[in-house]
Every structure is written in C-alpha cells, then in structure tokens.
Amino acid sequence: MILNAAAYHFARIDDPDALAATLHSRAQESGLLGTVLVSPEGLNLFLAGAEDSLQAFLSGVRNDGRFAHIIVKLSRSHAQPFARLKVKVKPEIISFRRENASPLEARAPAVDPPTLARWIEQGRDDAGRRLVLLDTRNREEYGYGTFENALTLPIDNFTELPEALAPHRDALADATVVSFCTGGVRCEKAALYLRADGMDNLLQLDGGILGYFEQVGGFGYEGRCFVFDERIALDPQLQPMVDIAPAASGT
C-alpha cells in the first residue's frame, strides 16, 4: 500500500528557495512523488510513497520549528497516484491575490467536524441561527460531491470567489455561514478576507472535507471529494474513485 499525505501550514519563510531545495532533496532521496509548494507565507504539500519513507519525511518537516504543528491528513492507495515529484516556489501556497488574507498572525474562527455534524443534524448552530454551508471550491470540484444543500458558486478559479459570493451576502446576513474546501487551506484565506470585509458571521471548517471524513465520515455529505491526483476523488471512507493498479513488474 502507498501512503498519501496532504498538509499545509502558514509560517513566515524568509528564504523559500532554500527550503524548496532542501525539501526536494529529501523527498527525492525518500522516493516520494507529488507536489510541494513553498512560498514566503508557508508550505503546502501533497505527497505519496512508502509509509516508512513518507513518515520519516514528515518527521523531518516537523523538526523545523516553523512547521512543528503542521497537521497532516493521511490516506492509502494500492499504487502511486502521482507521476512525478514537483517542488515549486510560489508567491502564495494557494493563489488568492488579495491583501491581508494570509493567516500569519491570526486565523478566522473555525468549527470542528463533530460540531458541524451536530449543527447539520439540528439545521442550526448552538445559538439557534440557521446554518448555511459555503463551498469555496470551483465547479469542477464540487461536481464530484458537496454537502447537502450547500451554497456553490459558478467559479473556475479560487480568485473569483469574493465577486461570485457578493450577490448572496445580504441573504446570508441572518445565518451562521461555514465555509469549506478540500483540506482547509482555501478557507484559511477566504474566511479571513471575508470577515475583514464585514462578513463576521462566517466560520471555516477546520481541516476541510478530508478532515471531516476522517473524524465524522459522510454525514450530511453527498458524493465524493475531488482530490488533485490520479485517484480523482475520495469517498467518506477515504477510498479512491479510481483505485490505481500497481505497475506490473517485468519477468
């Protein structure tokens, strides 16, 4: 079995090129494939490989004090879902192109998966306010699945989210709005930006859909969660839509 890891962490990186070179060397030596994005605001990675090798790599990441508390979401597949290793330096670990949207000093308030599951069952939050789930992903992604009755927006890129949400904001004023995405990184930015823009009734789902699947399962969710590799999408048991067969060995 192959171990798959998805993780992100916001931290100030003074020399992202140096960190990228170090991580590339370590991942390559460990036989890992996938994508690592490094920027001045932090780290975002999707990697897969042999369990011992990947766990050793992640331990090395955590040994860097800037990433000591990085949260990693793990799943397994029968074969490697990535074709190659890519380590890139980018201006942002997820492109949003808005000022003051990087949670380096503080993050927007979050709701944990068990609490959200309870709110979904109740149809309201603990204060009695109606609940609205806001999908911050694009139309291709939520086409594979989303929370029941979630507000989805006709966007192709994350950068389009604020403008696409604008026509709905008045109608959401009396609700508790919980934003969600695949693993949580997009909501870190979107929730922070939108709250600063006056949407103080907006929360983020801690850990995203994958974290919800890990802790709660599929309660209130319809379909699968799109992922960015050859598995295509995962069900609430974190099983792939396409279970890639291991490569045949030569004889």
Image: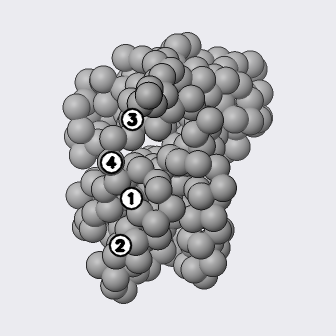
- On screen, residue 190 versus residue 165, left or right, reads right
Q: Which amino acid type corresponds to the residue marked 1 in the rendered image?
A: Val
Q: CA distance from mark 3 to mark 4?
A: 11 Å
In terms of depth relative to the viewer, which is nearer, 66 or 78? 78
Which residue appears at 51% of the width and 62% of the height? Answer: 30
Label 4 sits on residue: 84
Mark 2, residues whose alpha carbon is within 10 Å: few (<14), some, or many (≥20)?
some
Label 2 sits on residue: 20
- On screen, residue 112 versus residue 210, left or right, reads right
User: In terms of secondary structure, where does tag 4 sit?
Assistant: loop
Q: Which amino acid type corresponds to the residue marked 3 in the rendered image?
A: Asp
Question: Where 51 sits versus 42, above or below?
Answer: above
Label 3 sits on residue: 229
Which residue appears at 30% of the width and 24% of the height? Answer: 139
In terms of depth relative to the viewer, which is nearer, 171 or 106? 106
Q: CA distance from mark 4 to mark 2?
A: 16 Å
Q: Earlier in the sequence, mark 3 or mark 4?
A: 4
Which residue appears at 57% of the width and 80% of the height? Answer: 64
Q: CA distance from mark 3 to mark 1?
A: 13 Å
Q: Earlier in the sequence, mark 4 or mark 2?
A: 2
- On screen, residue 196 versus residue 88, left or right, reads right
Q: Earlier in the sequence, mark 3 or mark 1?
A: 1
User: Residue at the bottom extreme?
Assistant: 14
User: In terms of secondary structure, where does tag 1 sit?
Assistant: strand
User: Residue at the front extreme?
Assistant: 251
**Mark 2 near mark 3, Cβ–Cβ under 8 Å?**
no
Task: Give the x, y percent position of residue 92.
Answer: 30, 63
Q: Quadrant of the C terminus?
A: top left
Q: Which amino acid type corresponds to the residue marked 4 in the rendered image?
A: Arg
Q: Is residue 14 visible?
A: yes
